[in-house]
Image (cartoon, rainbow, N blue to C red):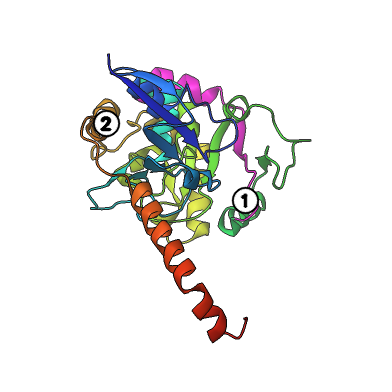
Amino acid sequence: MKEIKINFTDFWPGFDKTNNYFYNLLVQNYRVLIDEQPDILFYSCFNHDYLNYNCTRIFYTPENIRPDFTACDFAFSFDYSSRQNHFRLPLYSFYVELLGLLPKLTSIPTRDEARSIWRGKTEFCCMVVSNPNSAKRLDFFRNLSKVKRVASGGAVLNNVGGKVPDKAAFIKDYKFVISFENSSYDGYTTEKIMEPIYEDCIPIYWGNPLVSKDFNSARFLEYNSFQNEEELIARLLEIDQNEELAIDILMQPTFSVDKVAHEQEKEQVLDIISNMIENPKKPIAQQWWRYLHHCKLLYRKNKKRLLVKFKLL
């Protein structure tokens, strides 16, 4: 088994270098070492330490941020892009793989099972939010709360006596979950819609205008599919009072028919990275280092002339 040296930097707090989507894929085909002088660096958007690595650099973003293709050799993001050095890999794929959610997400309950699930939900609607910057999400919470109580278990607008320690345990008792993204952009789908589905809730979703390419639109309520909030809230209340409507939703498949199967997606990602390992090219990082070195030499050569020109000498 071939040995490869990799590393991870600029990821979110708590990121595990030896238990994540990319590492777990690569150990299937390679003997993987975490090394400070890697052959391949995986980096994200939470810092700029990647600039210290002079090797092949692969960018991954969980946030609504575009890849900088002048800094990376390849990028995985949620974007729909035709670039040859890009592959769409939304954040929810990380969660599906790391937490082993696929069997539950791809199973469909019988009508009797769905009925039992719905009758076991004792609460109406909730949200768990830590980011206070999404006005759309907070406005909807306030507007729905005027009609019927909505519980907030996160740090924002908390009304349950403090931040809940376990989001999944909290939301499972609720029929509906406000599942708004922090922002809206084509393709930007995170774990927010998937978590309520996993707990047999009905997500109320806003964010990715193309979300139905990922998730079956019959399995959730999409904010943008309604004429206005009043219409959406009326539909919520109707489902709340009519368990047959709710059961019909719970029995829907999670994913869109257009969605690439998760296992096929993993194979494509592994093929991409393996091809970079087996057919290495001069990394972007080395090209930049050479360019910056060239600029430094030009500066030194012309330093005196520049100082004279700007009257600093």
**Residue closer to the observer: 192 or 149:** 192
> Can the viewer see residue 3 in this picture?
yes
Q: Quadrant of residue 221?
A: top left
Residue at image location 40% in from the left, 25% down from the top: 23
Q: Quadrant of residue 110?
A: top left
> Identity of the amino acid at label 2?
Ile
Please provide the residue range marked out in magenta.
104-133
Q: Position of residue 12 (x, y in %)?
A: 56, 38
| Callout count | 2
Circle 2 crowding by C-alpha within 10 Å: few under 14, some 14–19, many from 20: some
Q: Position of residue 169 (x, y in %)?
A: 61, 24
> Split into 4 quadrants, where in the image is the N terminus?
top left
Label placed on residue 141: 1
Residue at image location 60% in from the left, 35% down from the top: 13
> Split into 4 quadrants, where in the image is the C terminus?
bottom right
Q: Position of residue 81 (x, y in %)?
A: 28, 53
Label 2 SS: helix
Q: Position of residue 143 (x, y in %)?
A: 62, 56
